[in-house]
Amino acid sequence: SAIVIRLQKKEWYFAFKPLPMIWILGFYGLHLHGLESISILQYWILAGVFFGLLGDIFLLYKKSIIPGSVFFLLGHLLYLLGFFRGNIGLPVHFWPLVFIPALAVPLWMHKHTHTPRYRPLIWVYCLFEGSMLFLAMNLDYARGVFPFLTIGAALFGLSDVFWALNRMVREFRSAGLFVLSTYYTGQALIVFSAMLAPGG
């Protein structure tokens, strides 16, 4: 609904944009409430979704881009804490899948942004997104499971790239469609992965 409203009824967008994340947070909270025990991973993901939601709300307004980014980055940090397992077992030949785009994207955006004061934020975001994707791949590989977490982290990062391109480099048509579709799907897959792994 938020995506359709973003395209058709922009005046309603501010009210509807956070709703999918509120639904995801509520559904996940109810799931955790029904478990006999909750893993550390699941706690971190729950906190990450909450602070990501706060970031969503603040980032609706251009004047609050800095506090919104802080909340959003805090959500990223909580995800990182949840994904981290203390050892890296991901084979080296997978590493370029993360490190090449994690370096190329901020270099390009650093050069082309129309607002120089956003350059540090671009690098910080890409550092967090690259780290999230790397640790998600490492965790999925260690568990030997279908990479829902990796796909979710990749879509989450792609959503941030679309958002930054539209806000910090150049506005483009249907930006909201690209940002929201990848963002909601990525967040849902991250939460779904945590729901499938009650043992942490």
Image (cartoon, grey):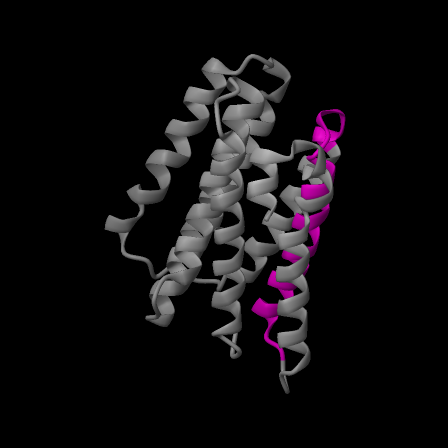
Question: Was residue 50 drawn as part of the magenta stretch in this picture?
Answer: yes
The x, y position of residue 196, in whole percent, is 48, 74
Query: Secondary structure of the magenta portion, mostly?
Result: helix
Q: Residue at x 34, y 67 (%)?
A: 146
Would residue 36 appear left or right of 199 to someone viewing this image?
right
Work out whether 96 lies above or below 82. Answer: above
Task: Identify which residue is drawn at 67% across, 42% down.
Answer: 56
Total marks shown come to 0
Report the span colored magenta.
38-66
Asked whether, in this view, residue 76 is left or right of residue 132, the answer is right
Q: Which of 14 and 165 is in front in this view?
A: 14
Residue 139: quadrant of the picture: bottom left
In the image, residue 7 above or below residue 183 = above
Nearer to me, 82 or 45:
45
| Residue 131 in picture, x, y percent from top left | 47, 46
Reply above or below: 150 against 64. below
Q: Residue at x 34, y 64 (%)?
A: 141
Residue 61 or residue 143, whichever sits in front:
61
Rendered image quadrant of residue 148: bottom left
User: Does the stretch in magenta take in 196?
Assistant: no
In this view, the residue farthest toward the bottom is 36
Residue placed furthest toward the left:
93
- The structure residue drawn at horizontal position 62% and vertical position 54%, both measured from the top left corner, is 20
Residue 11 in picture, x, y percent from top left: 71, 33
Residue 171, image x, y percentages = 53, 20
